[in-house]
Image: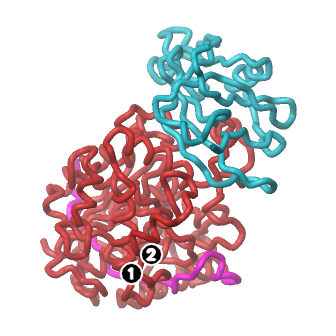
Chain colours: A cyan, B red
């Protein structure tokens, strides 16, 4: 068994702007949020200035349950950073309580061999540089 | 709609040698571009001073981190006057579509001889880890932290979804890698000339499951240029004209930034993003998949070849696996694919080697000549839009 691990946060940097700040500020507090159009109420990800359906700029930031489902995944041989070499698991996760919009993330915890399309996952948090946190996902056993 | 069918033709093609990644150093991009253009002029039988147009793609970037500057190119080559210089936006998705940009210039009387060129040198930054190396931006904060270092890692997620939805097997990806390698074995220009076996394929480490090293294209250096002009003028030049029957670029919002955002609807997610462009290309050409004699399909990663075969209608959606596993894409198959060995086994110059091979096939001078080839399809890379395709032929 090879346990799926998070990437080392000290190598991960993000930049933030007006559109994306609410997502990352909430993430700092370990809350997963997504932008929902203030007019037509449809979700979108990543955060953008306009609703692609109705072109509205109005946004409601909705706190989500953190539950997700693996839409696709890959197992990469080694991290793209200097240091320890270990396999890790990038995933595209769909968020059922946000119209199925998707996040690009990692699965951590559990055996890498168990990762599959359709796997139920729940959000966890990986501290990175400058005090930010990025959402990652653990297997959700329904407990 | 103005009918540009066969109104322009490719009349010259030229290239530098192909080198392994970084080995073209210390040549400059401008020198490599110049060498390719001069070779293309020689091939066409025209003076470089007659060049008056540039139709680039990839935003006129030479790979990643370098650019092609028309001003520098004409200064160094002594081209006296330029009447058209423009580029398709995006990246390698536009390679085939740049022929349409050239056609637009030529048919509007904006230029007489238009160059389309790409040069790639990976001495400073290799493409394989380009995303890991890029500076943090708000937009890539939703991608970069997941550790997807390069384009192959990104496209592994599309391949995995295709396997899940349609039962596609790694044997299909292997078939693409192996048939491309077989086509490269006898080519002096190919950088991979040793046979690849199925056993070796399955023994290789999975860099980004389900992709192993043989599913990735080569990382190489080099430059390729082609020259287009109006079809009437082309008839008087050195070679049999290779007519640009149609070219199309663009793509749907559903595909959009593709593997940079991953929010495509399911069917488009497990695709090459070419479906809408393919449909438009065939309509413009008045031709269909059954008319294609040889397919030059952009092969940065084997699964994306398979998905393009679906999007260009050579098989039904989801049937790409069985189609390639049947042997259809081999040199003696129903749809000979990349007889030059492609980017997987010959060299990767961001789509230009496919255009070069299409020209050679339609002149009848290709090393692995497809007997009687009259119509060729060239595609640009599945990538953030634009994606593109072109249909070329040698007989009107």
Q: Which residue is mark 1?
A: B184
Question: Which label's residue is closer to the chain start, 2 or 1?
Answer: 1
Q: Find the residue positioned furthest to the front.
A: A1
Q: Residue sitting at 47 percent across and 10 percent down?
A: A40
Q: Position of residue A132 (x, y in %)?
A: 81, 30
Quarter of the image where one finds residue B27: bottom right
Q: CA distance from mark 2 to mark 1?
A: 6 Å
- For residue B345, the mark is 2
Q: Does residue A95 sit above or below B214 in this rendering?
A: above
Quarter of the image where one finds residue B303: bottom left
- Describe the element under mark 2 as helix, strand or loop: helix
- Kindly indicate whether the residue at mark 1 contacts the one at mark 2 (C-beta within 8 angstroms): yes
User: Which chain hosts label 1?
Assistant: B
Magenta part, dominant SS = loop
Say if the magenta span includes residue A115. Answer: no
Q: Does residue B170 sit above or below A1 in this rendering?
A: below
Q: Residue sitting at 48 percent across and 52 percent down?
A: B210
Say if the magenta span includes residue B8. Answer: yes
Q: Position of residue A89 (x, y in %)?
A: 61, 42
Q: Is residue B113 visible?
A: no
Q: Residue sitting at 24 percent across and 47 percent down?
A: B279
Q: Find the residue positioned furthest to the right.
A: A130
Q: Position of residue A59 (x, y in %)?
A: 60, 13
Q: Does residue B92 sit above or below B364 in this rendering?
A: above
**Horizontal side of residue A55 vs B331, given as left or right:** right
| Stretch of the chain drawn in magenta | B1-27
Circle 1 Cα neighbour tier, 10 Å, few/some/many (<14 / 14–19 / ≥20): many
User: Which chain hosts label 2?
Assistant: B
Front residue of B75/B22: it is: B22
């Amino acid at each position: 068994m090879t346990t799926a691990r998070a990437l080392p946060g000290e190598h991960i940097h993000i930049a933030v702007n007006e559109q994306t700040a609410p997502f990352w500020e909430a993430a700092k507090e370990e809350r997963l949020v997504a932008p929902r159009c203030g007019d037509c109420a449809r979700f979108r990800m990543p955060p953008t200035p306009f609703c692609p359906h109705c072109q509205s700029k109005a946004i409601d930031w909705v706190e989500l349950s953190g539950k997700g489902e693996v839409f696709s995944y890959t197992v990469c041989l080694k991290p793209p950073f200097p240091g320890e070499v270990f396999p890790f698991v990038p995933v595209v996760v769909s968020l059922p309580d946000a119209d199925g919009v998707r996040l690009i993330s990692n699965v951590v915890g559990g055996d890498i061999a168990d990762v599959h399309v359709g796997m139920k996952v729940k959000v966890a948090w990986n501290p990175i540089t400058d005090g930010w946190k990025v959402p990652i996902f653990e297997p959700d056993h329904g407990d | 709609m103005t009918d540009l069918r066969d109104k322009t033709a490719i009349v010259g093609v030229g290239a530098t040698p192909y080198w392994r990644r970084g080995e073209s150093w210390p040549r400059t991009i401008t020198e490599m571009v110049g060498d390719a253009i001069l070779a293309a002029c020689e091939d066409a039988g025209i003076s470089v001073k007659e060049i008056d147009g540039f139709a680039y793609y990839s935003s006129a970037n030479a790979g990643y981190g370098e650019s092609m500057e028309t001003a520098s190119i004409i200064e160094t080559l002594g081209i006296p006057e330029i009447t058209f210089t423009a580029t398709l936006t995006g990246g390698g998705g536009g390679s085939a579509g740049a022929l349409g940009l050239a056609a637009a210039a030529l048919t509007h009387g904006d230029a007489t001889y238009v160059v389309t060129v790409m040069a790639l040198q990976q001495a400073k930054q290799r493409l394989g880890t380009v995303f890991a190396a890029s500076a943090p931006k708000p937009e890539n904060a939703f991608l970069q932290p997941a550790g997807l270092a390069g384009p192959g890692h990104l496209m592994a997620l599309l391949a995995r979804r295709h396997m899940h939805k349609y039962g596609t097997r790694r044997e299909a990806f292997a078939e693409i890698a192996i048939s491309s390698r077989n086509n490269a074995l006898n080519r002096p220009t190919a950088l991979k000339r040793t046979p690849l076996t199925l056993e070796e394929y399955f023994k290789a480490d999975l860099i980004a499951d389900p992709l192993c090293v043989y599913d990735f294209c080569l990382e190489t250096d080099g430059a390729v240029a082609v020259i287009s002009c109006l079809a009437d003028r082309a008839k008087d030049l050195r070679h049999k004209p290779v007519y640009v029957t149609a070219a199309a670029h663009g793509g749907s919002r559903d595909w959009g930034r593709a593997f940079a955002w991953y929010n495509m609807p399911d069917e488009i997610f497990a695709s090459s993003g070419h479906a809408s462009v393919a449909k438009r290309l065939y309509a413009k050409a008045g031709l269909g998949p059954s008319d294609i004699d040889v397919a030059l399909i952009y092969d940065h990663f084997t699964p994306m070849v398979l998905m393009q075969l679906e999007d260009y209608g050579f098989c039904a959606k989801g049937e790409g696996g069985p189609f390639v596993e049947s042997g259809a894409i081999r040199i003696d198959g129903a749809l000979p694919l990349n007889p030059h060995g492609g980017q997987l086994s010959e060299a990767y110059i961001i789509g230009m080697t496919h255009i070069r091979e299409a020209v050679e096939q339609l002149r009848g001078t290709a090393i692995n000549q497809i007997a009687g080839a009259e119509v060729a399809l060239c595609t640009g890379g599945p990538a953030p839009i634009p994606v593109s395709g072109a249909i070329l032929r040698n007989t009107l």
